[in-house]
Image (tube, coloured by chain):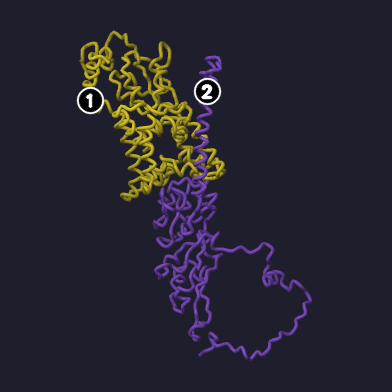
Amino acid sequence: MTTHALDAQSLKEKKRSWVLRNRFLLLRRSTQLLVLALFLAGPWAGVWIVKGTLTSSMTLNILPLSDPFLLLQTMVTGHWPELTGLIGLAIVVVSYAVFGGRLYCSWVCPMNVVTDSANWLHRKLDLKKGWQPKKHTRYWVLAMTLLVAAGSGSLAYELVNPVTLLHRGLVFGMGFAWAAVLMVFLFDTFVSRHGWCGHLCPMGAVYGLLNTKSLLRISAKNREACDDCMDCFEVCPENHVISPALRGKGDDTPLIQHRDCTSCGRCIDVCDLDVFSFTHRFDTQLIQPTSIEPGPRDPVATKAMGGHK
Amino acid sequence: MSDLKKTGLSSAKRRQFLGDAARTACGCAVAATFLTVYQAQAKALPADAIRPPGALTEEEFLSACVRCGLCVRDCPYDTLKLAELGETGPATGTPYFTARDVPCEMCEDIPCVAACPTGALDHSLTDIDDADMGVAVLIDQENCLNFLGLRCDVCYRVCPLIDEAIKLEMTPNTRTGSHAVFSPTVYADACTGCGKCEKACVLPESAIKVLPRRIARAESAEHYRLGWEEKAKAGNALVPGVIDLPDRVPDAGAFEPVFQPGKGQ
């Protein structure tokens, strides 16, 4: 990177406040904390809003929610859940399938905070990306957990599932669950970049499968403005999803359609040229860079005019 | 796979793909082996860990319970808890209680069962008196105060099914020769295993304990019949025409009991 490019980079960052550059990260931390707070309000303050854990919960004694991966494990052992469990399952499956399957991973799951922190440290230490499992590994792991459940007749994976261990630990009592969480942190930091959420977690794999036709999508609709700074690739937990949309030419859709996209919005945060934005799956329009009237949201034009906001 | 189609399945690509798949499959097989061994070890349920009312058999329970903790939350007496990782106890995350700490209060509406979203706690249990969490066993007659001849009676008094699940049965106190022993006797068919007796026992270590049925109970051989019951059922002797011979007692007068309850001093 040349000195000139560095200057341009710092100049771009100066124009956008820290809050703006982290707006979706802050929003996600808020929803993750909010979800946890709803579960903890009961045991800590006696205000019973949500009971149970993320595997199966009851909100205000009326809304049941059940995790699809957990109920899937139960069903492959040959046990059929009660109606409450099935209703909870249907609500979760339909909601995530419609809005965005992997919203769970980036906006709800407590492990996201751990793996994001691990990745932050990984970047600060400037480590190599390490072991990178093949792209379908998470589905192999998913199949493996279901096979063991079916073969052993018990929810074997739940004895070691770091995600449910962490959430149950926070809500009911940690025991040695912190050790499982620490293992994920160390694994993501030193062994494999984005290793857990990005390659192995079978829970995320199930939510990924729900993500194929979801409405909420991120679009690189301003891709013509991209100056190849690679910030989005650097920060995206599933960065293979970006290329088809960002590097697309002409009529190629600017939508990030890959089911692995967690809709975390981090690419929107870090992009100083406002290339990305949240939209729905039917919005395939591109922002034309050749527009004569430079609008306030047209960063290319803004940059050309010399830092005018 | 789509890559393969585009490149016309070149043999190098195919070898690469098969190699990757084989490696991943082997990795998963190794993980599956560890997981299978670990879950087998985790199936050992300690005798003092009691499952909530309505729990399916341990084998079925471990396939049905999603470890959500809703039963724990709806227990009004904080009886239930979830097993934590690293604890020498039931499978991680599953609900249980320890009777000596907090016994089951046998709520009539059985909120823990109602809360269970998977039926690991069987929703067909509607009368808490039918619950079968375990069986109380008077485990140490040598230290039980009642067996020593005192009238402690605490386990009997606290039993929610007093005179059904625990009865006091009177036998002569052969040590004093002039008192009765009121032995607390558990009737396993009526006992729900709530553990109130175990909790209430006044001894530093309880003389009566709730144990899982598999440990607490013997099983009668299938072909055994109790003659007197069969006789009552049939309404008459099953073998007709048995000759009743006179009992030959050597000298009836020599067996005058030392102590006869209810006959005065």
Give neighbour class at mark 2: few <14, some 14-19, many 20+ (Cα, 10 Å).
some
Q: Which of B94 and B162 is in front in this view?
A: B94
Q: The yellow chain is which one?
A: A
User: Residue B250 in the image: x percent, y percent?
Assistant: 68, 88
Residue lying at 32% horizontally and 16% vertically, measured from the top left: A228
Under circle 1, the secondary element is loop
- Specify the quadrant that holds the C terminus of chain A: top left
| Amino acid type indicated by mark 2 | Phe
Q: Can residue B1 be seen in this view?
A: yes
Residue lying at 52% horizontally and 89% vertically, measured from the top left: B264
Give residue A216's quadrant in the image.
Answer: top left
- Image height check: is B189 above or below B126? below
Return the mark for residue A158.
none
Return the mark for residue B17.
2
- Image height check: is A81 above or below A96? below
**Same chain for marks 2 and 1?**
no
Return the mark for residue A17.
1
Under circle 2, the secondary element is helix
